[in-house]
Image (cartoon, grey):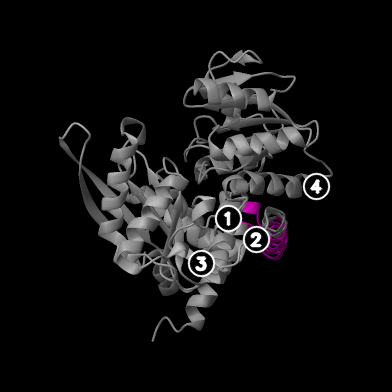
Amino acid sequence: MNALAATNCNFQHAARILGLDSKLQKSLLIPFREIKVECTVPKDDGSFVSYIGFRIQHDNARGPMKGGIRYHPEVDPDEVNALAQLMTWKTAVADIPYGGAKGGIGCNPRELSVSELQRVTRVFTQKIHDLIGTHRDVPAPDMGTNSQTMAWILDEYSKFHSYSPAVVTGKPIELGGSLGREAATGRGVVFATEFLLAEYGMSIANMKFAIQGFGNVGSWAATFIHQKGGKVVAVSDITGAVKNQNGIDIPALLKHKEKTRSLKDFGGGDAMDPNDLLVHECDVLIPCALGGVLNKENAADVKAKFIIEAANHPTDPEADEILSRKGVIILPDIYANSGGVTVSYFEWVQNIQGFMWEEEKVNYELKRYMKRAFNDIKAMCHTYNCNLRMGAFTLGVNKVARATLLRGWEA
């Protein structure tokens, strides 16, 4: 099932639980605006290359639209549409005043030089600058992009609209970025894990974790889990995978990856097939990579008791059913990975106020927001007698539906 179909399936289930009017359901699903642009740029060798860029602006009932920009060869309108919709529900679950958006360029950033990436980014910004903005649509980094990408967008946008630091989040600290933003998604994942385990009388200490994806989110999550006494027994990314049932030395693995840009040949564990990580023996599985990795083919073989969805829609609806029958507890993506957008909101607030926070305040507020959202999800689970995914979806969809109705959508 593709990303859009899976997301729509979860939305429709939540809408049925809430008893939403069919016309309102349709209105909530249809994106506010879909943008598709051609980005033609000169390469370093003098030849020209064209890429297709997308920006889907899903909903603005609760505030400006918000969402990442990803650079990846497989970026397509359906995926971007699904991720924009997920951002609408995610910001509502987190109770921050945004709607959802998502963008992307269908390119392989690994095959482009820094100067080529800069040219692609600036051309993309030129094509969409009049459709984004501090109170309209606020991009952020995603897969294949980073703080430098946001700095280029900020600079190019500011040529048209004067200096506007709040137009993007996830920026370098020197340009108005927030302390704590880089680690925010991974830190939020660990906060969410702590809250969930506490419900079952457990803690992170001495539990076994398997983490798929060792980029920004996975590496920070692994670091915090290691610091709290958890055993990360398996890690994978596109370069390989490593396992150690006694727990991987995460600081050593980070140094190895920084030095070699790979997980291969790490001395503190045994190599394993990356495809086996999702079914590796562990207590908690944390997928931090691409969507759809847990599906009807492998769900029955998952050995974890808990799944924390740090990636966007890593679990297909068919896999959801199989895992539920097995008694696996899944903490859904629209809550579990909301730490990044929450601290992006803090960054936006700081930029608008022109007053920056200490990192301690950022982390304190992140934990407070995530604890409140967790309690709100539990309340919806209790009200509607549903699992955590539907608790989160009914919470998010209900907030957006209420805002839409209060604004007078039929007028």
Q: How far apart are marks 2 and 3 (CA)?
A: 21 Å
Q: Which of marks 2 and 1 is nearer the N terminus?
A: 1
Is 286 drawn above or below residue 39 in the view shown?
A: above
Q: Residue 197 carries which label?
A: none
Amino acid, disc 1:
Ser
Q: Mark 4 points at which residue?
A: 198
- Closer mark to the observer between disc 1 and disc 4: 1
Percent position (x, y) of residue 87?
49, 58
Mark 4 residue crowding within 10 angstroms, few (<14) / some (14–19) / many (20+): few
The reply, left or right, for residue 70 in relation to residue 173 is left
> Which residue lies most toward the right here?
201
Q: Give the range drawn in magenta.
A: 367-391
Q: Do the residues labelled 2 and 4 touch (CB within 8 Å)?
A: no
Query: What is the crowding at mark 3: few (fewer than 14 residues within 10 Å), some, or many (at least 20)?
Result: many
- Labels 1 & 3 near each other (Cβ < 8 A): no
Query: Label 1 belongs to which residue?
Result: 178
